[in-house]
């Protein structure tokens, strides 16, 4: 379970390494204009060995509306119990997930893991293999869990993974909001090439699918035509495995994803 993420500056720098490997470029960051938070500046200005300049603006795209707030609640409740020793079942892997929005405002968040630790140790051994729905009832709230149980090596101490149920396709509005917010200041920058990075730090959903749903309106086309390229940046395992992924999504959607292992420098076209 990923509980931390790289800073925006680090994401830009690691993506630039990957972009250089994919395109044979030699760009390095020469300035971070957005260090002055009182001004609407872009994230980075880069320059290559021939003196060509590149402007980069970066933004995080949530996999669904309100994902950040819901993730914070998950990480303070069910997420705290990943591989908790009292929940491990020898010889079994348990994958336990809760729906998005399970933790409403007004309840004591620390009550949730405490109650789970009271009830689950007696429930888990009784569950057969496969997926089952389990309701955890508390006087002030209830929590619907989906629990998947599968057999692994009998000598294994067991695994207890936690997650949230992906609520489905969020449509194009989150991407459109990012374009309207980020492209104008990127377009106003002075550089030979201007690239917008749309980051996704979760496994669920794809930015390419959200982008493809954008309406073909004159307003959106005018926004897009004021910059040169848009790339997706996938950082879901950057913190845990030191790997970053990217693909171009405008002016053409390129499903040829490539990756870079930040630790080893290994580059891979997928």
Image (cartoon, rainbow, N blue to C red):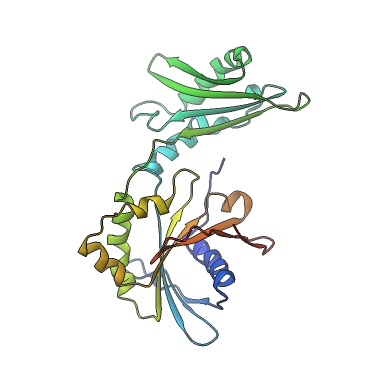
Looking at this view, name the residue that lies furthest to the right: 155
- 103 left or right, relative to 6: left
Q: Is residue 39 visible?
A: no
Looking at this view, name the residue that lies furthest to the bottom: 50
Which residue is found at the position 49% from the left and 87% from the top? 51
Which residue is found at the position 41% from the left and 26% from the top? 108
Question: In the rendered view of the protein, which quadrant contains the C terminus?
Answer: bottom right
The correct choice, above or below, for 269 with respect to 78 in the image is: below
Classify residue 258 by image quadrant.
bottom right
The percent position of residue 216, horizontal first and vertical second, equals 25, 59
The correct choice, above or below, for 20 with respect to 119 in the image is: below
- 262 left or right, relative to 47: right
The percent position of residue 151, horizontal first and vertical second, equals 68, 24
Closer to the camera, 123 or 174?
174
Closer to the camera, 205 or 72?
205
- 120 left or right, relative to 70: right
The percent position of residue 232, horizontal first and vertical second, equals 45, 59
- 145 left or right, relative to 38: right
The correct choice, above or below, for 24 with respect to 89 in the image is: below
Classify residue 44 by image quadrant.
bottom left
Classify residue 26 by image quadrant.
bottom right
The percent position of residue 188, horizontal first and vertical second, equals 30, 75
Count of numbered tags: 0
Question: In the rendered view of the protein, which quadrant contains the N terminus?
Answer: top right
Which residue is found at the position 67% from the left and 62% from the top? 266
Q: Is residue 77 visible?
A: yes
């Amino acid at each position: 379970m990923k509980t931390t993420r790289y800073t925006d500056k680090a994401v830009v720098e690691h993506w630039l390494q990957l972009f250089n490997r994919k395109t044979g470029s030699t760009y390095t960051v020469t300035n971070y204009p957005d260090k002055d938070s009182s001004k609407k500046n872009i994230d980075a200005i880069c320059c290559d060995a021939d003196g060509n300049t590149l402007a980069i603006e970066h933004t995080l795209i949530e996999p669904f509306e309100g994902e950040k707030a819901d993730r914070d609640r998950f990480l303070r409740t069910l997420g705290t119990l990943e591989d908790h020793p009292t929940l491990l079942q020898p010889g079994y892997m348990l994958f336990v997930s809760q729906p998005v929005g399970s933790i409403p405002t007004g309840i004591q968040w620390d009550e949730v893991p405490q109650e789970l630790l009271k009830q689950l140790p007696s429930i888990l051994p009784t569950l057969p293999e496969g997926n089952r729905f389990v309701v955890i009832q508390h006087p002030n709230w209830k929590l619907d869990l989906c629990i998947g149980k599968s057999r692994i090596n009998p000598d294994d101490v067991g695994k207890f993974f936690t997650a949230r149920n992906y609520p489905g396709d969020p449509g194009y509005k989150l991407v459109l909001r990012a374009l309207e917010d980020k492209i104008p200041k990127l377009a106003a920058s002075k550089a030979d090439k201007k690239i917008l990075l749309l980051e996704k730090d979760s496994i669920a959903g794809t930015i390419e699918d959200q982008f493809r749903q954008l309406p073909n309106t004159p307003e959106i086309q005018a926004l897009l035509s004021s910059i040169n390229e848009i790339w997706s940046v996938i950082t879901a395992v950057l913190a845990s495995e030191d790997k970053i992924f990217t693909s171009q999504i405008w002016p053409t959607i390129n499903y040829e994803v490539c990756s870079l292992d930040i630790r080893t420098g290994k580059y891979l076209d997928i």
